[in-house]
Amino acid sequence: MTFDPTLRIRRFHRAVTREVGALDQSFLGRGRPLGPARVLNAIGSGITDVDRIREYLGVEKTVLSRFLSGLQEEGLVTLSPAPHDGRRRVAALTETGATEFSAYEALSNTQASTLLADHPKPEAILTAMDLIASALVQDEVEIHVVDPNDPRVAPCLEAFYTELGTRLAQGFDIDLAVLPDASDMRPPRGVFLLAVSDRLPIGCVGIKGTDKGYGEVKRLWVSQAARGMGLARRLMEASEAHARQLSITRLRLDTNVVLSEALHLYQNTGWSEIDRYNDDPHPTHFFEKHL
């Protein structure tokens, strides 16, 4: 007999509501409820188009208008027509608003640190939170073109190499791997894509330009918490689309037999297995696709 899953989910919802102060009239003690505070956070984080704020927060237009009016009355926010489209409005923080945003950031960071410090298994807490957040916002993951040296890329690649070291029978020696130069994954030679979920990177893939008549797919990785929801397929489709834009007509990639999910993806999305084409000791299978 198992515990009632509906009861477990509702318990979780109630716990989160209490923890984040969703019902407080003074969220984090700053004198306003959670709703206006979240609007302030969105603007301070760079989401300034009013329609985009509404989409990001998932609130009705009338509710957002009420929140924005209140923030304007407090002298925290200004509204103005968008520079290139007078029908749209953009929001900006005043100097006082920026100070209030910073105060919320500090308090929220302290709250998060305290939660982890008070639990005997902080990494388990983070893993569970990543899994739940990925499930709740899986349709809102955005894929961006970024520079391969973008600081958000480094933790993705570190997680990728760590996983290879764990799963490959011979381990993973980065010194033996064929690592692409960053310049080979920048337009117009190549491209690097980063999957982002509410500012958190959860996946990546690169297209390495070569002088051999083909491009190479490199470093396809998806966070454990986001797997099984089609993100790897989305990243591959996006990489192929960008390859076409770069006039790359043929792609190659390699993988290892123990990475069964990767093998399954390639075998079911039009890739053809070919002979070994590089000296990297880690892969066991090689694929090609004509675009």
Image (tube, grey):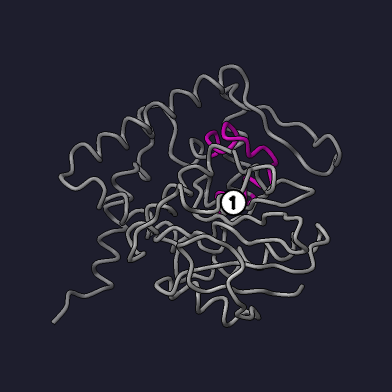
- Residue 97, percent across and down? 56, 23
Q: Is residue 252 above or below residue 97?
A: below
Residue 251, how many percent across, how many down?
A: 70, 67
Rendering coords of residue 231 (x, y %): 54, 65
- Image position of 150 with respect to 282: above or below: above
Q: Residue at x 66, y 29 (%)?
A: 92
Q: In front here: 283 or 240?
A: 283
Residue furthest toward the top? 95
Q: Is residue 83 left or right of residue 261?
A: right
Residue 40 forms part of the magenta stretch: yes
Magenta residues (range): 39-61
- The residue tagged 1 is 194
Circle 1 SS class: strand
- Residue at 62% x, 55% y: name it: 206
Q: Is residue 230 above or below residue 112?
A: below
Q: Label 1 crowding class (10 Å Cα cut-off): few <14, some 14-19, many 20+?
A: many
Q: Estimate the x, y position of residue 260 in percent, counting from the top left.
A: 43, 75
